[in-house]
Image: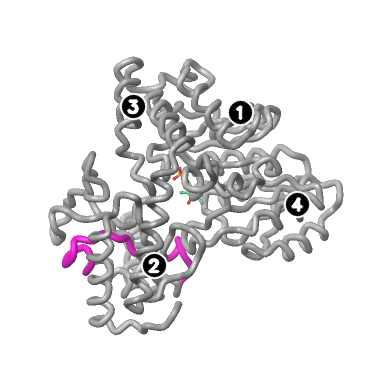
Amino acid sequence: MDFDALFQTQLDALKDEGNYRIFAELERQYGAFPRARCHDEDAPDEVTVWCSNDYLGMGQHPSVVKSMKDTIDACGAGAGGTRNISGTNHAHKQLEEELADLHGKESALLFTSGYVSNWAALSTLGSRLPDAVILSDELNHASMIEGIRHARCNKVIWKHNDPEDLDRKLAALPANAPKIVAFESVYSMDGDICPMQEIVEVAEKHGAMTYLDEVHAVGLYGPRGGGISEQEGLADRITLIEGTLGKAYGVVGGYVTGSDAMCDFIRSFASGFIFTTALPPAVAAAARTSIRHLKQSDQERLLQRQRVAYLRKRLDQEGIPHMDNASHIIPVMIKDPVKCRMLSDYLMQRYGIYVQPINYPTVPKGTERLRFTPSPLHSVEDIEHLVLALKDLWKQCAIAHAVA
Ligand SMILES: *Cc1c(COP(=O)(O)O)cnc(C)c1O
């Protein structure tokens, strides 16, 4: 059997649709973010990264880098095992305490990534709680969807950010079934923010637990970076808060926080927690330093907000349509996978601007987009350069100046 031919047929189909993914090969430069060296042949040697999820540049913060180096010097490279068998290091416990404190919860549990934390926690809750039903927002992230699928429990999809639809769907379920309402605070592709208070009230009315993904909000919102739940004063009413250490905190890892009993339950039953090597202690220490820094410093958040507002204003002035939302994510809608790829290529090759095209299946077909994430380290000149490049290309590509 010619397996490669089978693989190739499907790859060719992706290419025909314009949905084949090409990765830019970059070399991040410590101290120069958002600049990166680019190893692609037809691009300039140095590019400005406009689509990083290292939202605040914490991946190169001197204190974060120093704590990673110091911990390597003190503890060496790897963790040495799974958490159960010799892998639980002091740095992991310290980080979990920091995370519990960040969200005002009794406990926290660390995972190797945010993806794994969602997958492991949702699949464990859904499969281990007898007769559980998971009610999932229709735009939830792939990691939550996979966790729910793996749980093999009943699931109900509710309309995106629609508490009334959630209310109806909760009301239709048996009163005594354990119900889990799973949703996000900031949705990463449209940058919209959920009506958290209404969702929490509906869940409370039906005795459901709430499972909140704050991946795109931790570090960025709330006086200590505790996310939208902190900003809205709702953290104590959310049963489980999940987050990542890989985006605004600039390192890698994922976690859940909640009651002692719930974290102990997930720790004890989640395959994705038990059977995998723990994060290197240096990673845990660096993440903790990043969280501690953003708990007491507002400077990065304030500057990021200024940059985001400024880019939006300049796009408006030049008639470049972008999705309006209350977050730091600026989607410029292209609505065609081939055009989206082409614009991204031109930006890289002609202007040294790197923004990855966002295509299916990350977003629905017909809603392809460029997604800009200004950081405190993008200068006003960087923004001008970007806006003028977009203006040029807009003329050449004859994309409608209509509001998305
Ligand atoms: C990126 C992402 C995750 C996964 O987090 P990682 O730490 O990158 O694995 C989970 N949820 C959402 C909404 C995300 O965008």
Q: Earlier in the sequence, mark 2 or mark 4?
A: 4
Looking at the rendered structure, the kind of residue marked 3 is Met
Looking at the rendered structure, the kind of residue marked 2 is Arg
Query: Which mark is drawn over residue 68?
Result: 3
The residue under the point 21% across, 63% down is 348
Query: Which mark is drawn over residue 312?
Result: 2
Q: Secondary structure at mark 3?
A: helix
Q: Are marks 4 and 1 in contact (CB under 8 Å)?
A: no
- As displayed, is residue 335 above or below residue 172? below
Q: Position of residue 397 (x, y in %)?
A: 27, 81
* Crowd around label 1: few <14 · some 14–19 · many ≥20 (10 Å): many
Looking at the rendered structure, the kind of residue marked 1 is Arg
The outermost residue toward the right is: 175
* Crowd around label 2: few <14 · some 14–19 · many ≥20 (10 Å): some
Quote the CA–CA distance across marks 2 and 3. Answer: 35 Å
Quote the CA–CA distance across marks 2 and 1. Answer: 43 Å
